[in-house]
Image (cartoon, helix red, strand yellow):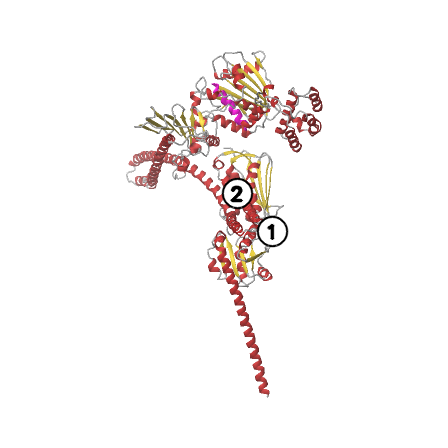
C-alpha cells in the first residue's frame, strides 16, 4: 500500500499572511498585542522612512522574549495557537492575540524581518526571514503589474515585481545561468523597486525577462524547503539591537535582566499615510482600558518622524477633562451594588444597595467618565490640547466599552453602538441633562471567572443577550441615570439661580435709583445758600465747616454706596455671564446643526418632486410588468420597463446616499483635516446623477492635496448649497452648466462656483446673502446666507461676480489658511 | 370609435415611456413633443397641428423649460375650453378646481395606478361628448345656415312677388 501525505506549497505562507490579515495597520496592532501577551511593560514602534525603498518598522518590547524552542516549535509551526492552551500570560494578563496570527502579521507588513529575542534563560539570538523566499513565479500577475506600471507609477505593483525577482534570485530551483542572465539585463541582482518605474526596464522585463521566468512558472517549492537560520548574538556584533532594548529599559527604569523582542521589518509592503497613522494611534489607545494603564502598565511609544510623531507615549489624557466620574461595582458575589458620583464642581452622590437575590451577571466593576462637550469643560491646558482636539478625542473614544479580562468585547461602545440606549433617550432630552454616548468614556470590566453567565456569542461579536446581560444593562443604566439625576438637579438649581439673578437685578436697579435720587436731591447747595444768607456772619465759617464735614461724610457714604453697587453689579454680571455662556455655547452648536439641516431641506425642496416622480414611476412600472406578465406579452416590452425601473433605482439611490451621508454624526460634530478633493468628489458623485437628469452638466476641478481643518458637514453644506443655488439658476435654461473649481494660493483656499444662469443683477451683490432673499417663486432664500455664515465662521469671505466663461454668476469663497485653528 | 389620440406634454423621457405604455393598456394613444418650446406662445398651434382628442400635461416641466404644466393648460384654455385635459402632479394643487372647469382633471402620479382606468374612461366619455357636441353644433350651424338661406330665398321670393 502506498502511503500519501499532504504537502504545503511555500507560497501559502504569503497567501495566509496577506489574506488572513488584510489590513496592515491591524497587522501591526496584532504584533503589539503579542508584546502585551509577553508581559511587556513598554513597547516602542518606530516607523522609519516609510514609502521609500529603505522603509522599515522596528518594534521593541520589554516582554519575556521567546525561547529558541518556542520560536522553532510554536512561532514557526503554522497552525499552533498556544493562546488557546495557555490563555493567561505569566503575569496573569489575558492573552490578546487569540487567533495566533502574529507571525502572519509580520509577513503582511514587510518583505523581510529580523527577529531578535532576549530571554532570561538563554543567550540572545536572531533569526532573519526573507518572505520573498516563499513566493512562486506568477507570470499572469507579473504581466498585470507591468501593465499597471506602464500606465502610472504604482509602488505596490513595483514591489510585487521586485519580490518575484528576489524569489527568482533566492531559490535554488533556478539555474544559475538564468539568474545571471536576468541580473545582466537588469544590471544587478540587488535592486530597489523604483527601477520598475522606468519604461526601458519595464520593456526589458516584458520582452527579455518574462520569457526566462516563464520556464520556472511551474516549479513546486514546499514550505519545508525554505530555510531560515538562527544565530546567537552578543552586544558586540549586534550593538544597535542591544542599545535599543537598553534604552527602553532605562526610560521606564525597569529591572534586569533585560528581556524582550525586537522585530525589524524591512521593505514595507504598503504606503503609509496620515490616516493610517491616525488609525494606528486610535487602535493602540483603545488596546487596553484606561484604568488598566494605571494598574498594569503597558506603555506604547510611537515614533514616526515623517508624520511629526516623535516618541509619543500613547495615553488617554482626555480623561483628565472629565466633568464627572462614576465608580461603580457589583460585588460580594453579586449581592451588593455600589455607585458613587463625583464631579469637578464638588457635587457627590452615592447609591448603595444590598440585594436579596444575587445578580446573575456576577461581580462587575465599572468606571464612567462623563464629559460636558463645551470649551470651558473640555480644554486641558496641562495636556496641551485645544477644544477641537479634545472633541476629536472624545468623538473617537466615547462610549461605554466592555472589557473581558482586560480586552475589548466588541462592538459595545463602538461609535454608533448604542447598547445602553443612551442616544435613543437623549433624543427626547429637552433640557440637556440626559447622558449621550458622545459624553461618556466608560469601562465595564468582566471576566470569564467572575461572570460565567455573560457568555460570548458564537460568532464572537458580542455577548448573548440573556437575563444576566439584561441585568448588566440595568446596572449601567442606573449609573448613567445617577449622572442625569445630578445634572437634572443642577439644571433645576440653575433655573433657581436665574430667578435669583433676576431678583438681584431688580435689587441693584433699586439701589441704583436710590443713589441717583440722592444725587438729584442733594440739599448741599441750598444749605450753603441758607448759611450765607444768615444775619449772624460770625457763625458762617463754623456752619460752613460743619456743612463741608457733612458733605464729605455724605460723599464718602455715597462713594461707598456706589462702590457696593459696582461690586454687586460686577458680581451679578459675572454670574449671569457664567450661566448664560453655557446656554450660548449650546445654542450655537444647535444653530449650526439647524443650518446644516436647512441645507438639506433646501436640497430636498429642489429635488423633492423629482423623487416623488421616480417613486410614482417605479410604482407604475411594477404595475405594467404585472399586467404584461398576465397578458403574456413580448419579453422585450417587459425588459424595457425593467430598464426604466433600474435607471430609477440608480437615481433614487444617488439621492438617498447624498442625504444619508450628509447627516452622519461624525461629519456634524468632528473637526478634522478634510481633503477637499475627496469631499468634492463624494458630494458631486451623488449629485451628478441627479442634475444630469435635468440635462445640467456639472464640471469639477480640484487641485490635489488641499487639506483644511473643518467640520466635513460645513464643507458639504457649502458645496450642496452652492450647487443647489446654481442648479435653480440654470434649470429650464437653454444652456445648463455648473462649474466648480477648488484651488489654493499661499494664503487661502479658493472655491469657485460658476453657472450659466442669469447672474446676479447689478446692485444686488450684497442683498443675495441676506436671509430669505430669493429670486425664485418657490425659493427659501437661506442657501447663500448659510454659506456666508459658515465661511465667516472660518474667518473667510464670499463674493459674487459675473462668470466670464459661463456668463452667469460666479461665487468665490476664500478660506484663510490657518484661519480654522482655534 | 377609432383609437383616441392624446398629446402628452412632458419633459421626462422615462415618464413618456411609462405613462404612454400605461394609457395604451386602455386603448389611448399618446403622442409627445420631442422638445418643448422655450415659451408658451404658439402652444395652441401645436395642439391644432397634432389634431388630438385630449391632453395629458405634467405639472413639472423643469427638465426642459422654465414654465409649468399649469401655465400650458392656461394658455390652451384661452383658445379651447372643451378639449379634455389631465394635469399630472406630484402634490395636490390647492386651488385647481377653482381655477379650471369640468374638462380639466388633476391626477396625482402616486395614484395613477389605481386611477388610470377611471381616468381613461373619463377621457373617452369626454371625447365622445365633445364629438357629439361638435356634431350637434355642426347640425345647429347647418340648420342656422339653412334657415338663413330659406330666409334669403323668402326675401327674394317676396321681392319677385312685388314686381309681379
**In magenta segment, residue B81:** no
Left or right position of A411 against A679: left
The quarter of the image holding the N terminus of chain B is bottom right
Left or right position of A346 against B8: left
Residue at the limit of the structure toward the front, as seen here: A1
Q: Determine the residue positioned at 46% across, 42% down.
A: A594
Comparing A768 with A117, the one in front is: A117
Comparing B27 with A803, the one in front is: B27
Residue A820: where, in percent of width, then height?
52, 34
Instruction: Report the number of numbered marks.
Output: 2
> What label sits on residue A604 in the rendered view?
none
Residue wearing tag 2? A653
Q: Main secondary structure of the magenta part?
A: helix
Q: Badge 2 sits on which subunit? A: A
Give the vertical position of A658 relative to A372 (above or below). below
Labels 2 and 1 positioned on one and the same chain: yes
Boundaries of the magenta span? A22-41
> What label sits on residue A734 in the rendered view?
1
Q: Are marks 2 and 1 in contact (CB under 8 Å)?
A: no
Amino acid at each position: 500500500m502506498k502511503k500519501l501525505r499532504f504537502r504545503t506549497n511555500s507560497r501559502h505562507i504569503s497567501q495566509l499572511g496577506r489574506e488572513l490579515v488584510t489590513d496592515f495597520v491591524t497587522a501591526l496592532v496584532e504584533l503589539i498585542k503579542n508584546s502585551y501577551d509577553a508581559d511587556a511593560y513598554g513597547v516602542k514602534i518606530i516607523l522609519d522612512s516609510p514609502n521609500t525603498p529603505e522603509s522599515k518598522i522596528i518594534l521593541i518590547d520589554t516582554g519575556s522574549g521567546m525561547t529558541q524552542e518556542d520560536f522553532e516549535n510554536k512561532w514557526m509551526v503554522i497552525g499552533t495557537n498556544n493562546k488557546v492552551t495557555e490563555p493567561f500570560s505569566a503575569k496573569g494578563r489575558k492573552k490578546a492575540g487569540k487567533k495566533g496570527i502574529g507571525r502572519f502579521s509580520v509577513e503582511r507588513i514587510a518583505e523581510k524581518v529580523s527577529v531578535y529575542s532576549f530571554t532570561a534563560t538563554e543567550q540572545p539570538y536572531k533569526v532573519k526571514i526573507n518572505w520573498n523566499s516563499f513566493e512562486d513565479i506568477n507570470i499572469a500577475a507579473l504581466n498585470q503589474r507591468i501593465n499597471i506600471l506602464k500606465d502610472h507609477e504604482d509602488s505596490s505593483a513595483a514591489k510585487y515585481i521586485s519580490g518575484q525577482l528576489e524569489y527568482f534570485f533566492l531559490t535554488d530551483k533556478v539555474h544559475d545561468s538564468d539568474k545571471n542572465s536576468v541580473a545582466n539585463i537588469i544590471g544587478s541582482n540587488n535592486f530597489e523597486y523604483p527601477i520598475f518605474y522606468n519604461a526601458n526596464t519595464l520593456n526589458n522585463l516584458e520582452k527579455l525577462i518574462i520569457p526566462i521566468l516563464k520556464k520556472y512558472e511551474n516549479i513546486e517549492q514546499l514550505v519545508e524547503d525554505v530555510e531560515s537560520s538562527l544565530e546567537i548574538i552578543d552586544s558586540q556584533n549586534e550593538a544597535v539591537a542591544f542599545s535599543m532594548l537598553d534604552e527602553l529599559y532605562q526610560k521606564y527604569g525597569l529591572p534586569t535582566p533585560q528581556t524582550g523582542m525586537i522585530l525589524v521589518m524591512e521593505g514595507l509592503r504598503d504606503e503609509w499615510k496620515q490616516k493610517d497613522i491616525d488609525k494606528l494611534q486610535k487602535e493602540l489607545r483603545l488596546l487596553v482600558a484606561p484604568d488598566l494603564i494605571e494598574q498594569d502598565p503597558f506603555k506604547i511609544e510611537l515614533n514616526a518622524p515623517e508624520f511629526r510623531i516623535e516618541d509619543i507615549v500613547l495615553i488617554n489624557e482626555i480623561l483628565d477633562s472629565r466633568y464627572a466620574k462614576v465608580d461603580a461595582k457589583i460585588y460580594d458575589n453579586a449581592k451588593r451594588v455600589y455607585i458613587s458620583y463625583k464631579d469637578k464642581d464638588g457635587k457627590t452622590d452615592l447609591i448603595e444597595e444590598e440585594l436579596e437575590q444575587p445578580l446573575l451577571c456576577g461581580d462587575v466593576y465599572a468606571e464612567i467618565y462623563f464629559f460636558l462637550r463645551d470649551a470651558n469643560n473640555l480644554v486641558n491646558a496641562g495636556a496641551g490640547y485645544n477644544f477641537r482636539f479634545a472633541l476629536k478625542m472624545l468623538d473617537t473614544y466615547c462610549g461605554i466599552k466592555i472589557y473581558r479580562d482586560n480586552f475589548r468585547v466588541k462592538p459595545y461602545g463602538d461609535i454608533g453602538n448604542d447598547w445602553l440606549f443612551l442616544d435613543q433617550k437623549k433624543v427626547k432630552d429637552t433640557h440637556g441633562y440626559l447622558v449621550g454616548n458622545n459624553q461618556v468614556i466608560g469601562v465595564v470590566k468582566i471576566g470569564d471567572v467572575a461572570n460565567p453567565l455573560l457568555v460570548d456569542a458564537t460568532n464572537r461579536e458580542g455577548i448573548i443577550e440573556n437575563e444576566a446581560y439584561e441585568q448588566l444593562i440595568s446596572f449601567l443604566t442606573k449609573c448613567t441615570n445617577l449622572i442625569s439625576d445630578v445634572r437634572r438637579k443642577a439644571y433645576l438649581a440653575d433655573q433657581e439661580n436665574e430667578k435669583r439673578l433676576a431678583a438681584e437685578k431688580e435689587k441693584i436697579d433699586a439701589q441704583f435709583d436710590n443713589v441717583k435720587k440722592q444725587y438729584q436731591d442733594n440739599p448741599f447747595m441750598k444749605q450753603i445758600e441758607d448759611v450765607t444768607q444768615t444775619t449772624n456772619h460770625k457763625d458762617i465759617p463754623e456752619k460752613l465747616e460743619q456743612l463741608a464735614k457733612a458733605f464729605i461724610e455724605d460723599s464718602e457714604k455715597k462713594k461707598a454706596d456706589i462702590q457696593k453697587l459696582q461690586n454687586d453689579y460686577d458680581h451679578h454680571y459675572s454670574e449671569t455671564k457664567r450661566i448664560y455662556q453655557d446656554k450660548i455655547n449650546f445654542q450655537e452648536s444647535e444653530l449650526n446643526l439647524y443650518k446644516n439641516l436647512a441645507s438639506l431641506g433646501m436640497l430636498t425642496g429642489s429635488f423633492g418632486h423629482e423623487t416623488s416622480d421616480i417613486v410614482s414611476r417605479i410604482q407604475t412600472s411594477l404595475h405594467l410588468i404585472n399586467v404584461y406578465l398576465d397578458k403574456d406579452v413580448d419579453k422585450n416590452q417587459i425588459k424595457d420597463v425593467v430598464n426604466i425601473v433600474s435607471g430609477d433605482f440608480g437615481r433614487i439611490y444617488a439621492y438617498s446616499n447624498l442625504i444619508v451621508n450628509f447627516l452622519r454624526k461624525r461629519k456634524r460634530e468632528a473637526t478634522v483635516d478634510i481633503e477637499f478633493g475627496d469631499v468634492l468628489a463624494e458630494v458631486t458623485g451623488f449629485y451628478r446623477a441627479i442634475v444630469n437628469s435635468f440635462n445640467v452638466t456639472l464640471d469639477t476641478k480640484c487641485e490635489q492635496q488641499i487639506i483644511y481643518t473643518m467640520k466635513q458637514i460645513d464643507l458639504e453644506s457649502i458645496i450642496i448649497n452652492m450647487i443647489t443655488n446654481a442648479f435653480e439658476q440654470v434649470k429650464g435654461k437653454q444652456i445648463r452648466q455648473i462649474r466648480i473649481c477648488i484651488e489654493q494660493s499661499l494664503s487661502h483656499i479658493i472655491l469657485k462656483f460658476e453657472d450659466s444662469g442669469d447672474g446676479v443683477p447689478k446692485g444686488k451683490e450684497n442683498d443675495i446673502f441676506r436671509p430669505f432673499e430669493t429670486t425664485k417663486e418657490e425659493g427659501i432664500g437661506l442657501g447663500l446666507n448659510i454659506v456666508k455664515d459658515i465661511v465667516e465662521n472660518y474667518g473667510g469671505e464670499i463674493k459674487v461676480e459675473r462668470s466670464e466663461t459661463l456668463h452667469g454668476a460666479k461665487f468665490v469663497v476664500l478660506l484663510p489658511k490657518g484661519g480654522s485653528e482655534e | 370609435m377609432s383609437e383616441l389620440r392624446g398629446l402628452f406634454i412632458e419633459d421626462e423621457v422615462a415618464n413618456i415611456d411609462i405613462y404612454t405604455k400605461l394609457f395604451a393598456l386602455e386603448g389611448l394613444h399618446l403622442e409627445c413633443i420631442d422638445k418643448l418650446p422655450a415659451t408658451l406662445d404658439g402652444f395652441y398651434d401645436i395642439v391644432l397641428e397634432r389634431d388630438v382628442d385630449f391632453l395629458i400635461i405634467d405639472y413639472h416641466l423643469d427638465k426642459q423649460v422654465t414654465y409649468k404644466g399649469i401655465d400650458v393648460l392656461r394658455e390652451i384654455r384661452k383658445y379651447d375650453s372643451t378639449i379634455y385635459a389631465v394635469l399630472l402632479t406630484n402634490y395636490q394643487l390647492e386651488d385647481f378646481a377653482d381655477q379650471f372647469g369640468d374638462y380639466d382633471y388633476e391626477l396625482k402620479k402616486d395614484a395613477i395606478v389605481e386611477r388610470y382606468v377611471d381616468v381613461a374612461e373619463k377621457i373617452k366619455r369626454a371625447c365622445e361628448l365633445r364629438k357629439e357636441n361638435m356634431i350637434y353644433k355642426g347640425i345647429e350651424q347647418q340648420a342656422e345656415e339653412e334657415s338663413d338661406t330659406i330666409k334669403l330665398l323668402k326675401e327674394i321670393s317676396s321681392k319677385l312677388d312685388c314686381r309681379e
